[in-house]
Image (cartoon, grey):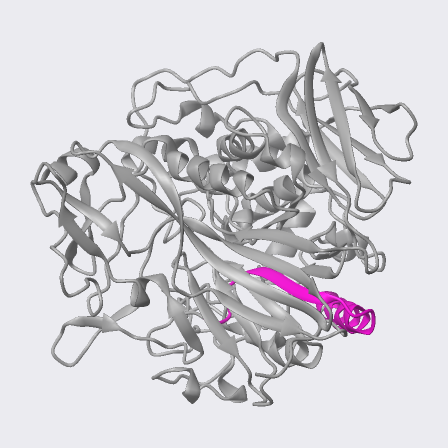
C-alpha cells in the first residue's frame, strides 16, 4: 500500500513546527530544544498497536476497530446467540496518514523520561469490522487475530423493548493523556472559604515530606500542593474502578488527549483504554465527544494562526479517523461529530460544542452581547454568548480545511457549529422529539459545561471573561426542557459540579454535570479579588447545587507515625455513575459522583485507591414516557 503523505498534506503537517504555542499553551521546559539528537520511531511490529475497541453499539450490531502497524488484514471470529458455532470476518487495513510523528514530536524531551521511550512506530493501519443480525441483550465472545497475535474479549448487546432490568453508564471527561502525565502531578486546589472541616489539621506546607515527594505550585498567589498521583496513575486507577463497576457504556465528554494533533497523546490514551494498561474498550463501547483539545495540536502549533489553521484541522481529523461514529445522513461531511446511540431505554445524544457563531474573542473585543458583571441572574437573552472557541474563527477553520484537503469546498468542511442556524441544532431538535415520542430516557453530552462555577464558567462578555466558555451552550436549554432531557454531561472546568436547571419553573428540569475529573487538572472554583484585594469564589452559576471544591471540605489527621494524612473530603479524580432501574411506573435514575481516594503510607507512597461516593447522590423517577417527573 502506498502510504507517504501527499505533498499538500505533508506541508500542512510540517507547517505547525514553525509556529509558536498560542497564549494559554506555553511550551514547558521539557519541550524546549537542546543539543540531544532526535529520537527515532520504532520499526513497525506485528500484532496490535491498539487493541480492539467497541464502537456504534446497538441491540443487533457492533463495530470492532483496532490498529496495527503492518499492512496485513486481520481476522475476527465471534460466537453467541444466532451465530451458530461462530462467525468470522476479515479486515481491510486502511493507512492513517495523519498519525505519523512530526519532527517536533521526535525532538521532544520530557523530564524524568528517557527521550523517545514513549514513541511507537510511525505506521498506523485502522481495521474496522461490523457484525450485524445479533440478538438483543445477549453476550457475544470474540477473538481478533492480527499478524499472529490474538486478543479475546466479550460484549453484551443492548436490550430491546420492555425486556430490561438495569442499565449502567459511566461518564467522565478531561483525561487529557500525554507522555508527560507519567511523571506530572497536577495542582490540587483548596477552597479559600470551605477548605477544611472544623477538626482538621492543615495541609502539609513548604519543605514538608509531601512537598519533597510531589512538589508544590502557586495558584491565585498562594502555595498549592500537587496531587499525590501522577496523571497516568490517576487514569489507570480511575479506569480500574470503572471496569470493576461493569458498565454497559462509557461516555467521554471530550478532551480525551492533551492535544489531538499530538500523536504521542493518542498513543497514551489508547494504552490506557485498549492497550498495556487495560482493555476496557474491548469490552465496553466508548461514546466520545469532541472538546477544545480535539482541535489543539500541542507542540505542533497549538490552534494554529489565521495565517495557517491546519493544526486545528489535523487535530480534529485525528479524532474523527480513530472513531467510527454514526453519521447524520443529511450531513455526512460532519463525520459523526454529533450522533445518537440508543441503548435499550436510554438515548445518548452527543453534541459538538467546539465552535459557535457569531464568533467571539476576548482578546480582540469581538463580543455578541453587552458586557455585564455579577452572576448569571444578570444574564438575559441579550447578554447570552454565542461562541465557545475564541482562539479561532469559523472562517479561518474553513480556510485551513481547504488547505489541508486540496480540492475541497466549503460544503465539505467537518466543523458543524452549535448555533441555532446550524444543521446540528436542527438534527438535535429532531432526535430529541423522536426519542420522546418513543418513550426514551435521554442523556445529552458535550464538552463545554454550560453551567459552571469554574474558570470557564463566565462568558466572554463578563467583567471576568473567559475565551472558551461553555455558556453559549445554554441556548439549548429550552430545547432540553421541552423534550424532557434527564441529565446533561459535560467537562471542561475539571472540578466535579452538579447544577439543577429548570428555567421555565415547571418543576421538570435536568441535572447538568461537569465530570472533567478523569485524570488531568483538579481545579477549584473561579476566584476573583474582592474589595480588600483577597481572592474569593465568583460563583457565577446560580444553578449550582453541589461541587467537590465548594462542598467537600478536607479532613486531615496524623497517622500512627505522626504523619499528616488526608482522611476524607477534597477534590479527587473520578467519574459519574448513572444507574437506570426498570420500575412498574417507568424507571428510577441514580446518579452517583464517584471519587478515587488515595491511601498513602507514612512515606506518602500509594498503597491503594478506594472507590468512594461524594455526598451528592441524586435519585429521581421518570415516567412511562421517559421524561423526568416534576419535583
To which quarter of the image does residue 550 belong? bottom left
Residue 392 horizontal/vertical position (percent): 52, 59
Q: In terms of depth relative to the viewer, which is nearer, 265 or 568?
A: 568
Q: In which quarter of the image is the N terminus?
A: top right
Residue 486 horizontal/vertical position (percent): 63, 70
Q: In terms of depth relative to the viewer, which is nearer, 390 or 539?
A: 539
Q: In this view, does 359 lie above or below 48?
A: below
Magenta highlight on residue 257: no
Q: In terms of depth relative to the viewer, which is nearer, 203 or 350?
A: 203
Q: In which quarter of the image is the C terminus?
A: bottom right
On screen, residue 577 versus residue 38, left or right, reads right
Is residue 374 among what the camera can see? Answer: yes
To which quarter of the image does residue 580 belong? bottom right
Tell me what residue is drawn at x 76 percent, y 29 percent.
141
Q: In terms of depth relative to the viewer, which is nearer, 173 or 344?
A: 344
Residue 174 horizontal/vertical position (percent): 47, 49
Residue with the most extreme front position: 584
Tell me what residue is drawn at x 77 percent, y 48 percent.
158
Magenta stretch, residue numbers: 423-451
Tell me what residue is drawn at x 21 percent, y 33 percent.
601
Is residue 458 among what the camera can see? Answer: no
Q: In this view, does 40 lie above or below 310?
A: above
Magenta highlight on residue 447: yes
Q: Is residue 149 above or below residue 428?
A: above
To which quarter of the image does residue 436 belong? bottom right
Residue 594 horizontal/vertical position (percent): 44, 53
Counting every numbered tag in the picture gives 0
Tell me what residue is drawn at x 50 percent, y 72 percent.
471
Amino acid at each position: 500500500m502506498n502510504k507517504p503523505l501527499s505533498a499538500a498534506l505533508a506541508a500542512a503537517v510540517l507547517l505547525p513546527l514553525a509556529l509558536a504555542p498560542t497564549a494559554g499553551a506555553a511550551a514547558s521546559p521539557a519541550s524546549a530544544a537542546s543539543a540531544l539528537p532526535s529520537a527515532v520511531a520504532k520499526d513497525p511490529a506485528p500484532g496490535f498497536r491498539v487493541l480492539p475497541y467497541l464502537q456504534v453499539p446497538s441491540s443487533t450490531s457492533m463495530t470492532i476497530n483496532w490498529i496495527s502497524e503492518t499492512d496485513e488484514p486481520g481476522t475476527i471470529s465471534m460466537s453467541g446467540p444466532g451465530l451458530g458455532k461462530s462467525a468470522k470476518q476479515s479486515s481491510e487495513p486502511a493507512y492513517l496518514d495523519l498519525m505519523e510523528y512530526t519532527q517536533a514530536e521526535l525532538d521532544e524531551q520530557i523530564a524524568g523520561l528517557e527521550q523517545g521511550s514513549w514513541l511507537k512506530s510511525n505506521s498506523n493501519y485502522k481495521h474496522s469490522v461490523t457484525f450485524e443480525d445479533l440478538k438483543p441483550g445477549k453476550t457475544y465472545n470474540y477473538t481478533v487475530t492480527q499478524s499472529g497475535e490474538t486478543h479475546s474479549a466479550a460484549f453484551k448487546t443492548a436490550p430491546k423493548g420492555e425486556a430490561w432490568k438495569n442499565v449502567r453508564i459511566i461518564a467522565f471527561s478531561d483525561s487529557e493523556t500525554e507522555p508527560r502525565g507519567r511523571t506530572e502531578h497536577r495542582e490540587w486546589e483548596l477552597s479559600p472559604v470551605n477548605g477544611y472541616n472544623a477538626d482538621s489539621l492543615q495541609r502539609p506546607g513548604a519543605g514538608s515530606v509531601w512537598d519533597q515527594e510531589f512538589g508544590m505550585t502557586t495558584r491565585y498567589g498562594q502555595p498549592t500542593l500537587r496531587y499525590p498521583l501522577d496523571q497516568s496513575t490517576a487514569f489507570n486507577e480511575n479506569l480500574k474502578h470503572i471496569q470493576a463497576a461493569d458498565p454497559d457504556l462509557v461516555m467521554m465528554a471530550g478532551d480525551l488527549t492533551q492535544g489531538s494533533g499530538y500523536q504521542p497523546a493518542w498513543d497514551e490514551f489508547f494504552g490506557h483504554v485498549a492497550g498495556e494498561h487495560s482493555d476496557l474498550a474491548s469490552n465496553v463501547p466508548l461514546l466520545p465527544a469532541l472538546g477544545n483539545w480535539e482541535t489543539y495540536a500541542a507542540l505542533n502549533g497549538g490552534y494554529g494562526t489565521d495565517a495557517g489553521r491546519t493544526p486545528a484541522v489535523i487535530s480534529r481529523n485525528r479524532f474523527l479517523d480513530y472513531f467510527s461514529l454514526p453519521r447524520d445522513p443529511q450531513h455526512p461531511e460532519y463525520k459523526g461529530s454529533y450522533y445518537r446511540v440508543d441503548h435499550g431505554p436510554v438515548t445518548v445524544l452527543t453534541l459538538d460544542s467546539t465552535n459557535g457563531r457569531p464568533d467571539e474573542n476576548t482578546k480582540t473585543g469581538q463580543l455578541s452581547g453587552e458586557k455585564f458583571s455579577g452572576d448569571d441572574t444578570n444574564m438575559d437573552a441579550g447578554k447570552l454568548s454565542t461562541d465557545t472557541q475564541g482562539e479561532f474563527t469559523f472562517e479561518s477553520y474553513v480556510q485551513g480545511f481547504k488547505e489541508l484537503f486540496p480540492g475541497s469546498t466549503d460544503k465539505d468542511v467537518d466543523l458543524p457549529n452549535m448555533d441555532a442556524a446550524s444543521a446540528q441544532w436542527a438534527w438535535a431538535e429532531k432526535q430529541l422529539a423522536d426519542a420522546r415520542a418513543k418513550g426514551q430516557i435521554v442523556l445529552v453530552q458535550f464538552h463545554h459545561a454550560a453551567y459552571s462555577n469554574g474558570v470557564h464558567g463566565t462568558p466572554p462578555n463578563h467583567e471576568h471573561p473567559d475565551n472558551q466558555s461553555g455558556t453559549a451552550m445554554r441556548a439549548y436549554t429550552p430545547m432540553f426542557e421541552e423534550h424532557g432531557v434527564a441529565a446533561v454531561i459535560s467537562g471542561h472546568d475539571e472540578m466535579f459540579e452538579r447544577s439543577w436547571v429548570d428555567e421555565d419553573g415547571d418543576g421538570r428540569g435536568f441535572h447538568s454535570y461537569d465530570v472533567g475529573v478523569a485524570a488531568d487538572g483538579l481545579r477549584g472554583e473561579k476566584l476573583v479579588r474582592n474589595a480588600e484585594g483577597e481572592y474569593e469564589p465568583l460563583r457565577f452559576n446560580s444553578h449550582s447545587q453541589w461541587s467537590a471544591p465548594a462542598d467537600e471540605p478536607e479532613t486531615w489527621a496524623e497517622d500512627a507515625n505522626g504523619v499528616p494524612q488526608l482522611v476524607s473530603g477534597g477534590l479527587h479524580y473520578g467519574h459519574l455513575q448513572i444507574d437506570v432501574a426498570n420500575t412498574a411506573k417507568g424507571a428510577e435514575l441514580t446518579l452517583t459522583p464517584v471519587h478515587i481516594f488515595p491511601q498513602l503510607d507514612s512515606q506518602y507512597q500509594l498503597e491503594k485507591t478506594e472507590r468512594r461516593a461524594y455526598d451528592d447522590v441524586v435519585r429521581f423517577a421518570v415516567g412511562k414516557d421517559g421524561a423526568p417527573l416534576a419535583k
